[in-house]
Amino acid sequence: MAKKYKLGFDIGALLLFVAVMIPNFIWSALPAPNDILRAESVTKTIDAIASVCQALMLAALCFIQDRERKKLSVSPLLIATGLCCLLYYISWLAYYRGLAGAIVILGLSVPPCMAFILYAIDRKNWVAVIPALGFTIGHIIYAMVNFIA
């Protein structure tokens, strides 16, 4: 399996990560009304595991490449990745409009994770899919336990 991959830098992965993180940077500096996301988490261990998975996912997406991947171009998976980002931004807009129900919270949790998974699949980066799935599971548990259940 190691022969299938090589070290290299994927600028698209970094741009995707930055695109997903921009609303988080804004939220850190400018609190939203009805800002329930600032509450202390009751899933600290799961959050820590999800953070490790997120870091591993980012590293794998950015620095591990499938030798047989195609040049980055428009594909159904990349369109779906973009749609996930759009849904994520719409969820942030709803959150900043004061909505913090289950649909909005799930919109802040699921689409960005799916964007990373879809991007990894498009780039044939199965190494990144594994920590992306771990991050997704942890992110959804965090959202469900802290804000929905």
Image (spheres, rainbow, N blue to C red):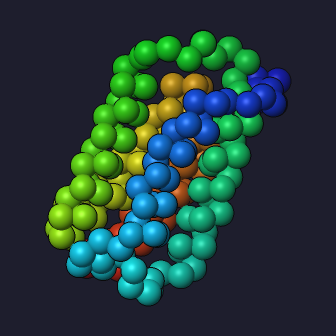
Left or right: 103, with 117 as reference point: left
Q: Among all residues in the image, which is located at the extreme front?
A: 30
| Quadrant in the picture for residue 32 | bottom left
Horizontal relation, residue 103 to residue 81: left or right:
left
Residue 49 is situated, as x and y percent measured from the top left of the image, at 60, 69
The C terminus: image quadrant: bottom left
Left or right: 148, with 43 as reference point? left
Residue 107 x %, y %: 28, 55
Above or below 36: residue 78: above
Let me know if residue 127 appears in the view: no
Q: Is residue 10 above or below residue 147?
A: above
Residue at image position (49%, 53%) is: 21
Q: Relative to 143, does residue 4 appear above or below in the rendering?
A: above
At horizontal 27% and vertical 44% (from top left) the residue drawn is: 87
Residue 115, quarter of the rendered image:
top left
Residue 103 visible in the displayed image:
yes
